[in-house]
Image (cartoon, rainbow, N blue to C red):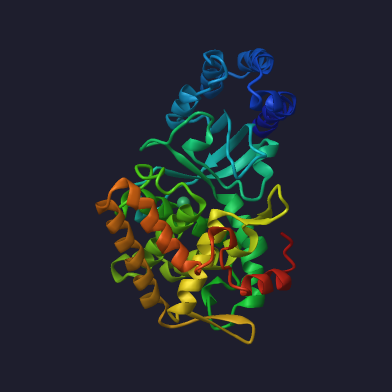
Amino acid sequence: MEKNIENQKIINKFNTLKSKYEYGIRLKDEKSYQSLMNELILLESSFNNKIIKNFLIDIKTTKEGTLTLKKTIESINNSNNENFITSIFNIPYEPTMGIDACFYELINIEPALKKYKTNAVPILLKEKTKGFDAPHMVAIFPENHEGIIASKGDKIFYLVNKFAIRHLNTTQKIIQSCVDTNSLKRLRNITYQDMEDAVVYWVYLHEHHHQNVGNLPIPEYLNLKSSKLLAGLEELRVDIGSMLLLYEGHNKFIKNNIFLFEFILSERLLRYGVDGLKYNRNNKIAPSYDALSSYMFFNLLEKKDGIKIKNNKIIINEKIIYTLKEIYKEINETELKIKKSNTEDRKKIMLEFAKKCLGDEKPESYISHPFYNKIREKINHQI
Ligand SMILES: [Zn+2]
């Protein structure tokens, strides 16, 4: 049988398991665990796969509902050629994920990027269960697996084709209709392949900055940065860091560095603020942490003259690079202050900074620039 047909069969099986047992597993129901296990044993015997084997061991050793997928994540971290992931996922911002599985294809990293050591693994998502259909399900972090706390060295899988599709379907529309024709010039008339290539650079440098750059790296300080507001600020920090790294002279050996710079800028500044919102249970609009990072970015850039709006279009000013450097410096200084302060003051200092970027309002009513509403109207994006 052809590989992809065989893979699709396994995925179909996982989709069935998902619809049959996910609800029970969420309620930590003993019977659901037992039935899931029995079906996995059958599946494992017909499909010899190390990851399913370890997944099964984890479920077997589950006692009184405390599921910890340690063996599963270990085998995913050390996998060589399975190109397969399965788990019980618990992702607060992606409730569609639960019992899910996917096959993937590894993407080769160019030598220019390899010198930035990270555990980012850019992949192309292939056959996949329904949970992965959610538009914003674009990466698999270690802490997304039930019962796992991220530790240094755990692989982070970035689903490059899903990032590229979002750029194609949303960011490109924003650029065409809401950005002045003299700005973000290198992002016009690009191919889908250019988008995938840019995503690989983006996620790789992004992860490099999370882990290796700054005073409060991740996962060491993940807990401190876990609130929505501070997670948003962290996303902003690492993307500005990546943009500056691409822009600086000594990195010009990365070909297309200005194209990559503009790609990251367009994603962080424009798209997340437009499509990173949804209605919560109380029917109120809730921005994701990525959307908050866009809001902060927009407000800071406008205040410092890095961007302006003219005739309903965004203009990226020539001096944006100086503005980015200023913002980056401010974020880094704030982090240093936190590092030197005691635990009680830490969150307060960081929250104060994040709030400063979002106006003086309470956290419940973050200031989002009205231009994001205009963009949504123009590209016909429904929340
Ligand atoms: Zn990130």
Q: Nearer the viewer, residue 174 or 11?
A: 174
Please report the residue visible at 35 percent of the width from the left and 56 percent of the height from the top.
Answer: 112
Quarter the C terminus occupies: bottom right
Figure quadrant of residue 167: bottom right
Outermost left residue: 340
Q: Is residue 115 above or below residue 176?
A: above
Left or right placement of residue 198 versus residue 338 in this view: right
| Along the viewing direction, whichever of 366 and 376 lies nearer the viewer | 366
Q: Is residue 47 above or below residue 131?
A: above
x and y percentages locating residue 339 in the rendered image: 28, 52
Q: Residue at x 38, y 35 (%)?
A: 151
Q: Position of residue 57 (x, y in %)?
A: 52, 15
How many badges with numbers are in the image? 0
Residue 128 shows up from this direction: yes
Q: Residue 82: horizontal and vertical position, in percent?
A: 52, 29
The residue located at (59%, 41%) in the rendering is: 92
Residue 78 location in percent, x, y? 42, 29
Q: Quadrant of the N terminus?
A: top right
Q: Say whether residue 264 is left or right of residue 173.
A: left
Residue 56: quarter of image: top right
Q: Is residue 1 visible?
A: no
Q: Nearer the viewer, residue 144 or 42?
A: 144
